[in-house]
Amino acid sequence: MSLGWKIAIGVAVVLLIAVFGYGWHIRTVYAGYVASTDSGDPLFPRDTLEDYGQQILDELNDKDVKLAVISRSGQAREKLPEGVMFTHSAFFRRNANGGYDVYNLYHGEENRLRSTLVTDTPADFLRLLQERDAGILIPDAATQYLLYDFLESPEYDAVHQPDYSLISNPFDLRWQNCNELMLYAIAAAIWETTDRQVLLEKLMTTITPTELKVSPLRRHYGPMIDERLILDDHGEKVLTTTFGTLTQLFETTERLDESYVLAFEN
């Protein structure tokens, strides 16, 4: 084999490794934004997750909370972009036994571009936890009652958009992720409508979504690496819903009682 061919093959191999390496980097970066999934290997053993879940329940019961919004991080915080502290949120709704049921949106594994509404347990919600804490949003008592009834009504399904995007733009109705579902569910209960166009218009004058700093290279290659990275709903800025956005909605509508981070013991 001639020297020229050896050089060409060597360059091709280096480029191939670089492409796959960059692809893995892109996937990791985007996966840290918002991950509406319960699929993956847990970092903590089940008994630890059960204990952390119980700590959340004890916190809510001590405050006599009927319904709360809880967020957890499915990525190490050092990997999360600016403005993002948690990656997945859900409603914790008190049940008849004094515990709490967890109302989530998860995307499918066979079809990762479609999502479903799932009710599970606190330990299941925490299964992909990477940080030993959780964000807690407690609405005022009147809003807790509104959302408590809303979650068991047809209206909850009505604000669900099954077409899934990892970092969906809350100001575009074509796709949705877990945090955006929470945003629209809260808005629907507060403003007493499930007309998503009406909710969109009201939200546009009420909140400022979290802007993600995404380079042109990541915007170009991201959708090629992971089909969940649909960026057609973003303009010059990449906007998404976070724990901070949900907090802002409660604050601007004067519906917030408390917002804080619970650090798990042990």
Image: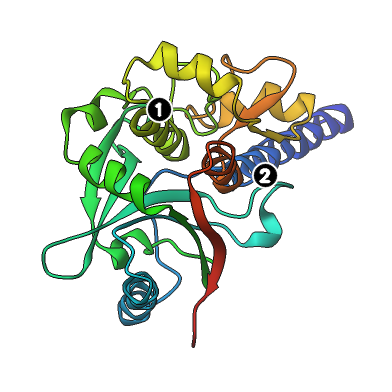
Earlier-in-chain disc, 2 versus 1: 2
Residue at screen point 37% across, 27% down = 113
Q: Which residue is mark 2?
A: 25
* Spatial separation of the CA atoms under disc 2 and disc 1: 22 Å
Q: Secondary structure at mark 2?
A: helix
Q: Position of residue 196 (x, y in %)?
A: 38, 16
* Nearest to the observer: residue 41 or residue 81: 81
SS type, badge 1: loop
Which mark is in front, 2 or 1? Answer: 1
Task: Please tell me whether residue 40 is drawn above or below residue 51 in the rendered image.
Answer: above
Q: Amino acid at mark 2?
A: His
Q: Which mark is residue 154?
A: none
Nearer to the camera, 170 or 229:
170
Q: Nearer the viewer, residue 4 or 32?
A: 32
Q: Residue 96's image quarter?
A: bottom left
Q: Is residue 132 left or right of residue 144?
A: right
Kindly indicate the quadrant of the structure image that contains residue 147: top left
Is residue 56 among what the camera can see? yes
Quick check: 141 left or right of 9? left
Q: Is residue 38 visible?
A: no
Q: Is residue 235 above or below residue 41?
A: above
Specify the label residue 164 is tagged with. Answer: 1
Query: Residue 264, how many percent across, how many down?
Result: 49, 78
Residue at 74% across, 39% down: 18
Q: Residue furthest bottom?
A: 266
Q: Would you place residue 156 above or below residue 254 in this image? A: above
